[in-house]
Image: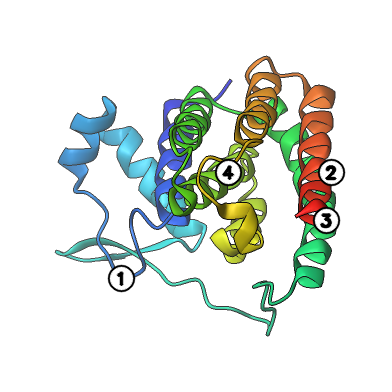
Amino acid sequence: MTTRTQQLVDTLTAHIQEGVIRPGERLPTESSLIETHGVSRTVVREAIARLKAAGLIETQHGRGSFVLARPSTTGFDPAPRSREDVLDLLDLRMGIEVEAAGLAADRRTEPALAALREALDGFARAAGHPSSAVNADFRFHLRIALATGNRYYGDLIASFGPAMIIMPRERLRPARPDFDTIVAEHANIHAAIERRDREAARAAVRVHLSNSRARLLDG
């Protein structure tokens, strides 16, 4: 069973990964975290300690806790520059995100599930707004990674950024006729994770990314 401390760690980690709190910015104060999340001072202090141990933040005496930049240790540049790059990236994502969805179904917390639902709803509302749709789509996939509880999945998907969603310009036109189909694919993933069905979650991501590949080739 996930503790209140771990739930707060998961929430703050998601905020850091998604750029809600950026490197160099200060975390909310202890009092603010207590009020916002309805937890005790002990829970907040333990969560801060875990984030510090994970290398996500540093605490400066008398100033508070600040988000650290995550230095890149390789020259890996995931940004696709061509259609072939996007296809190759989809192959890589298939290997990573299928397993991430299975782990998310096993390990997701209620806050992580709520965050995933919020991203799904945001994506559904973005019909006819390509830029918003791309960003909401990315948030959905990132939040699956964060729901695994394994920071390496979140770090990797975060490193891809929204560019991993970008399709050829003609496929980003307003009122795409297949937009409802894409929303339904995301909803199937969410539903499987919600009911903790590991294999269904894996299958739903596999179907979605396979269909994404087909849509790209047809575009």
Assess disc 2: are there few (<14), some (14-19) or many (≥20) residues with their C-alpha within 10 Å of its C-alpha: some
Which quadrant is the N terminus positioned in?
A: top right
For marks 2 and 4 on the same chain, the one whose residue lies earlier in the sequence: 4
Nearer mark to the viewer, of 2 and 1: 2
Residue 212, how many percent across, how many down? 76, 46
Nearer mark to the viewer, of 3 and 2: 3
| Above or below: residue 132 compared with residue 181 | below
Assess disc 1: are there few (<14), some (14-19) or many (≥20) residues with their C-alpha within 10 Å of its C-alpha: few
Nearer mark to the viewer, of 4 and 3: 3
Assess disc 4: are there few (<14), some (14-19) or many (≥20) residues with their C-alpha within 10 Å of its C-alpha: many
What colour scheme governs how the chains and residues are painted in the rendered image of this protein?
rainbow
Instruction: Name the residue beneath numbered marker 2.
Output: 210
Nearer mark to the viewer, of 2 and 4: 2
**On the picture, is 195 further left or further right than 29?**
right
Assess disc 3: are there few (<14), some (14-19) or many (≥20) residues with their C-alpha within 10 Å of its C-alpha: few
Cα gap from disc 3 to disc 1, whole angstroms: 41 Å
Cα gap from disc 2 to disc 4, whole angstroms: 22 Å
Q: Secondary structure beneath disc 1?
A: loop
Residue 39, how many percent across, how many down? 29, 27
Q: Secondary structure beneath disc 2?
A: helix
Which residue appears at 19% of the width and 48% of the height? 29
Under mark 3, the amino acid is Leu
> Can you tell which quarter of the image residue 158 is in?
bottom right
Between 60 and 105, which is closer to the camera in this rendering?
Answer: 105
Instruction: Name the residue beneath numbered marker 3.
Output: 217
Which residue appears at 85% of the width and 51% of the height? 95
Instruction: Name the residue beneath numbered marker 4.
Output: 146
